[in-house]
């Protein structure tokens, strides 16, 4: 309790000792008191401020809007208070000071307006700390991203380093990794960071075409080379001239195409089907596979000389289950992507949903995680994705937490694909809008398995 003999001196001492700026206004909006902290924050001494209005401080936001030019328009006199409003105060020397502003209308017991008390907290140190934190986050983001490839794990940092080294050379690159690990993204990164970035990047899925079609697709043909060849056609190697060609699923090509590809790598020239003319090409070759090529070499189904020509600079992409620390980062990226696409405002996951994602082995790797987030957006109605929004296989941990090797995964996929006869596969494609990735997800197999099944049952790549 304040001693009576101290009177107004005690109140003055109290105001002067506060770290926050405090000033008062009379009922007409003119400043009647001004403590020392207000001078420190604003640069204005009490002699500068007394008798003036707070318009001199140029608050950027007041009562949710720009500070009015007239005291009569000031909403504090109508609404009665302002609580913790972050805004900018214009310092005497012209620069802006971030502050937290609060205000209270003071009335007499009879309800007569006596004036206003305003407090101002200097947020300069907090803003500087925020900027440092934001800069650190941006730097972390830069370290975690490379040409749309996301990963802060040690394994992915090794991949980023390898990609930069590959881009600085012209060496043939072999990308190895399970289905869904992002081999196409890595190939794109190598191309766009290389000296060939101005040239084309041509992608060929070697498992999607029959032997004869693949030969024509890669090398082109001349008119009359075979039935239906009504005109000359350049192949994908020629289209990639001056740029890069990505040969995806390279482990699926037959011995004849392997031999022709070996000649391309050795001589950098091609012959169109039905033609004897040799054509020089200037290309950079990147090959990708989800199979173990060395095992194929040992089994005699892949040429050893071609294998060593392709693996001049090998890059192995780690499966998602071996870089679990990247799951939240990737999931956040896919949420941002879906927010832009759908117009929703999902901010993240509940603790249970995130735990389920971290526990899931993701046999489909990054592609499966992206599909899971897209699936969740269909069901999610709030700001957080809940466990019930995730696909059933993640909710119930239906898949084994032990990762299959390339060969075991291929065998498992083959068993699942074998269950699909031609009719079932056509139904699945119709249900998926002929989106092969979606069909693969629904069937629980890799996209390559769907391509192979379509090839086996002579199903066209697009709906007829």
Image (cartoon, helix red, strand yellow):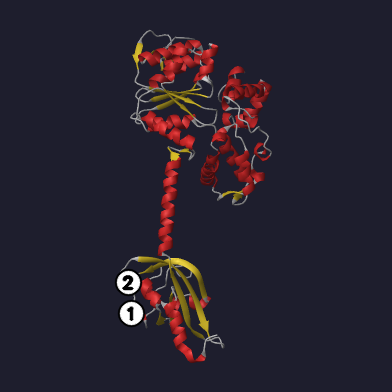
Which residue is depicted at the point 40% across and 70% down? 59
Camera sees residue 378? no
Q: Nearer the viewer, residue 434 or 228?
A: 434
Q: Quadrant of the N terminus?
A: bottom right
Q: Nearer the viewer, residue 220 or 106?
A: 106
Q: Which residue is mark 1?
A: 48
Q: Earlier in the sequence, mark 1 or mark 2?
A: 1
Label 1 residue SS? helix
Q: Residues within 10 Å of mark 2 (few under 14, many from 20)?
A: some
Q: Quadrant of residue 12?
A: bottom left
Task: Tell me the number on the disc at residue 92.
Answer: 2
Above or below 2: residue 431? above
Q: CA distance from mark 1 to mark 2?
A: 10 Å
Which residue is depicted at the point 48% across and 34% down? 155
State if disc 2 and disc 1 touch (CB < 8 Å). yes
Residue 427 image offset from top left, x and y in percent: 66, 27
Label 2 residue SS? loop
């Amino acid at each position: 309790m304040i001693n009576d003999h101290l009177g107004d001196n005690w109140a003055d001492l109290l105001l002067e000792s506060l770290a926050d700026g405090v000033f008062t206004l009379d009922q007409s909006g003119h400043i009647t008191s001004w403590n020392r902290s207000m001078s420190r924050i604003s640069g204005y001494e009490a002699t500068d401020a007394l008798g003036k209005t707070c318009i001199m401080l140029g608050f950027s936001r007041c009562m949710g809007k720009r500070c009015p030019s007239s005291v009569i328009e000031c909403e504090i006199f109508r609404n009665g208070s302002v609580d913790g409003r972050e805004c900018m105060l214009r310092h005497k020397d012209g620069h802006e000071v971030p502050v937290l502003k609060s205000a209270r209308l003071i009335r007499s017991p009879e309800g007569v307006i006596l004036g206003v008390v305003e407090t101002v907290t200097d947020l300069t140190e907090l803003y500087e700390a925020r900027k440092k934190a934001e800069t650190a986050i941006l730097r972390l983001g830069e370290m975690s991203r490379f040409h749309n490839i996301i990963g802060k794990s040690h394994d992915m940092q090794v991949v980023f380093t390898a990609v930069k080294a590959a881009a600085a050379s012209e060496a043939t690159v072999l990308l190895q990794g399970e289905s869904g690990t992002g081999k196409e993204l890595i190939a794109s990164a190598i191309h766009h960071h290389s000296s060939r970035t101005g040239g084309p990047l041509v992608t060929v899925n070697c498992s999607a075409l029959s032997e004869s079609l693949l030969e024509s697709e890669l090398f082109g043909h001349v008119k009359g080379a075979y039935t239906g060849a009504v005109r000359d056609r350049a192949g994908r190697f020629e289209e990639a001239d001056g740029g890069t060609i990505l040969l995806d699923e390279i482990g699926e090509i037959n011995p004849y195409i392997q031999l022709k590809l070996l000649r391309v790598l050795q001589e950098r020239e091609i012959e169109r089907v039905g033609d004897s003319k040799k054509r020089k090409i200037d290309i950079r070759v990147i090959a990708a596979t989800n199979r173990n090529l060395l095992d194929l070499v040992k089994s005699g189904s892949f040429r050893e000389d071609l294998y060593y020509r392709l693996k001049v600079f090998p890059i192995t992409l780690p499966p998602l289950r071996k870089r679990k620390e990247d799951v939240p980062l990737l999931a956040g990226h896919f949420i941002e992507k879906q927010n832009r696409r759908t117009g929703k405002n999902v901010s993240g996951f509940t603790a249970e949903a995130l735990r389920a994602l971290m526990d899931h082995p993701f046999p489909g790797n990054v592609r499966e995680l992206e599909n899971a987030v897209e699936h969740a957006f269909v069901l999610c109605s709030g700001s957080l994705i809940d466990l019930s929004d995730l696909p059933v296989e993640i909710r119930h941990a239906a898949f084994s937490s032990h990762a299959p090797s390339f060969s075991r995964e291929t065998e498992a996929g083959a068993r699942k694909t074998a269950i699909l006869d031609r009719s079932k596969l056509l139904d699945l494609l119709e249900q998926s809008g002929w989106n092969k990735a979606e069909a693969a997800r629904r069937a629980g197999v890799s996209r390559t398995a769907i391509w192979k099944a379509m090839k086996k049952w002579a199903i066209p790549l697009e709906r007829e």
